[in-house]
Image (tube, grey):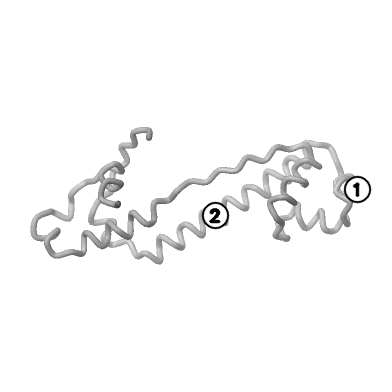
Amino acid sequence: MAENNTTVDAASVWDTDSGDVAQSLADDNLQAQGHLWEALRGALVASGLSYEDVASRLGIDVDLVRAISGGRVDISLSDLREYAYAVDASITYRVIPRYSHYLETFRQLLSEKHWHDSHSDNVQFDRRTLEALVP
């Protein structure tokens, strides 16, 4: 594992609502989906193909191609690959762990009385320390 010197302030973690973490994750994923559709529209333009050309390549209705290109239709990963192939684009998947379970465990540890008796709320923890706290 590459070394990561990211620090987390104990007080800020204490004040973070787990609902805020979930909402942040949902927002990030929705934003990533928007970037995906923008990139696919860009690939369509770069290919020089029309909606009609792509519809013909995919064997689907041109209105469906417009809806897909506009991000108005949820499609499967296999449909996404076919669409990318039709517009001469490559798809790269990337999953980034958010360590939400570490945050929840850390918050539980901070809430335990013995922690507050012996530590300051201003203690800094690096990611390696957080990972060591969670089995």
Quarter occupied by the N terminus? top left
Q: Position of residue 51 (x, y in %)?
A: 85, 48
Tag 1 near tag 2, CB within 8 Å: no
Which residue does the image show at 30% across and 58% down from the upper left?
Answer: 105
Q: Residues within 10 Å of mark 1 (few under 14, many from 20)?
A: some
Which residue does the image show at 27% across and 46% down from the upper left?
Answer: 132
Identified by mark 1, the residue type is Ser
93 or 27, which lies in front? 93
Q: Is 15 left, or right, of 76 in this rendering?
A: left
- What residue did someone put label 1 on? 56
Q: Is 98 left, or right, of 10 in this rendering?
A: right
Secondary structure found at label 2: helix
> In the displayed image of the protein, which residue is found farthest to the left?
117
Residue 29's disc number: 2
Identified by mark 2, the residue type is Asn
Secondary structure found at label 1: helix
Which residue does the image show at 47% across and 57% down from the upper left?
Answer: 25
Q: Is residue 128 above or below residue 108?
A: above
> In the displayed image of the protein, which residue is found farthest to the top?
2
Q: Residues within 10 Å of mark 2 (few under 14, many from 20)?
A: few
| Disc 1 to disc 2, C-alpha distance | 31 Å
Q: Earlier in the sequence, mark 1 or mark 2?
A: 2
> In the displayed image of the protein, which residue is found farthest to the front?
135
* Marker count (numbered): 2
Residue 68's disc number: none
Among the 4 quarters of the image, the one containing residue 94: top right
Which residue does the image show at 29% across and 52% down from the upper left?
Answer: 134
Q: Is 118 left, or right, of 68 in this rendering?
A: left
Q: Position of residue 106 (x, y in %)?
A: 27, 56
Q: Position of residue 70 (x, y in %)?
A: 74, 55
